[in-house]
Amino acid sequence: DLIACKDNFLCLVEVKTRSSDAYGFPEEFVDYKKQKRLIRGGKMLLNRKAYQDLQIRFDIVSVLFKDKKAEINHIKNAFEE
């Protein structure tokens, strides 16, 4: 959902939003298949000249709405290739 550069990292960020935790927390919906797609996309980006000197990191931003308020959780380095 987001691509950002911070320090020497290229960060690919998956944002998951849910209106309830009745079926699990938002970050639990970043399954193995989704992780593999993000990893593949990240590797393709690292092949571009502008990003060759960067390391890659995969983050998840979890947004859960409770009582009309958003609970936001940023999970850095949520998974690796």
Image: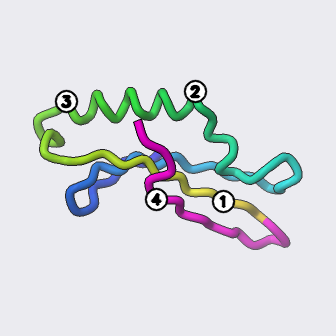
Q: Amino acid at mark 1?
A: Val
**Any mark on residue 63, and which?**
1
N-terminal-most mark, 3 or 2: 2
Determine whether label 3 and label 1 are within 8 Å by CB.
no
Q: CA distance from mark 4 to mark 1?
A: 14 Å
With 2 as the anchor, is 28 left or right in this view?
A: right
Q: Which residue is mark 4?
A: 76
Give the image location of residue 27, x and y in percent.
65, 50
Residue 78 sits inside the magenta stretch:
yes
For label 2, the crowd category at 10 Å Cα-Cα, with few meaning under 14, some 14 to 19 and many 20 or more, is few
- Colour scheme used in the picture? rainbow
Q: CA distance from mark 3 to mark 2?
A: 22 Å
Q: CA distance from mark 2 to mark 4?
A: 19 Å
N-terminal-most mark, 4 or 3: 3
Give the image location of residue 45, x and y in percent.
27, 34
Q: Which residue is mark 2?
A: 33
N-terminal-most mark, 1 or 2: 2
Q: CA distance from mark 1 to mark 2?
A: 21 Å
Q: Amino acid at mark 3?
A: Asn
Question: In front of the other: label 4 or label 1?
Answer: 4
Determine whether label 4 and label 3 are within 8 Å by CB.
no
- Segment colored magenta: 66-81
With 35 as the anchor, is 31 left or right in this view?
A: right
N-terminal-most mark, 4 or 1: 1
